[in-house]
Image (cartoon, rainbow, N blue to C red):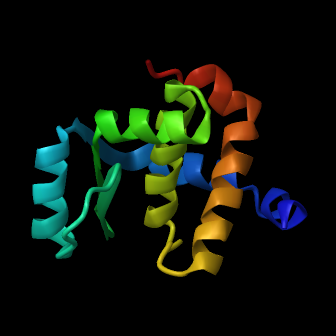
Amino acid sequence: MINEIEHHGLASILADYFLDTYVTVRLLSKSEMLFQNKQLLNHDYYTDVITSFFDQPNAKEVHILICPELVQENAKKLGVDKSLEMRRILFHALLHTQGFNDRSVTQKNLMRLLENELLSCSTWKQNLTLS
């Protein structure tokens, strides 16, 4: 699968897509995130990230909602650094804008593979640092 990802140049595709895209990122508390998950997706559970996007011929907008508290909890569970997990969920959100879903186990596994591939790109490591 990694060869297929490299062949398609996923990092390059994402970079090209977002050159003329308006992106907003909002940080929310757990309770605010739960409320948004109910309102936007009709899901009655906590989530670390919600993505909405609009891709019109003359305007592209991406709105990303993040709950730092849940990101930190997930990082602790996974035994990874908080900033690494924050980058992972940002990539996760961006992958949704490219048509990837995570409803099934197979889809979740593919998204995790793609997230890992994006995290391994040296350009992203150098240019995207969150704390």
Asked whether 93 or 30 is in front, the reply is 30
Which residue appears farthest toward the right when viewing the image? 3
- Please give the name of the residue rendered at 66% of the width and 68% of the height, measured from the top-left corner: 109
Answer with left or right where residue 95 lies relative to residue 62: right
Asked whether 63 or 70 is in front, the reply is 70
Q: Position of residue 19 (x, y in %)?
A: 47, 44
Is residue 40 something that shows in the picture?
A: yes
Picture layout, residue 130 above or below residue 31: above
Occupied quadrant, residue 44: bottom left
- Please give the name of the residue rendered at 32% of the width and 34% of the height, measured from the top-left corner: 68
- Please give the name of the residue rendered at 26% of the width and 42% of the height, measured from the top-left corner: 24
Q: Position of residue 106 (x, y in %)?
A: 65, 79
Q: Position of residue 85 (x, y in %)?
A: 52, 37
Q: Position of residue 115 (x, y in %)?
A: 63, 51
Answer with left or right where residue 14 lies relative to residue 10: left
Quadrant that contains the C terminus: top left
Q: How many marks?
A: 0
Asked whether 90 or 84 is in front, the reply is 84
- Please give the name of the residue rendered at 34% of the width and 41% of the height, measured from the top-left corner: 70
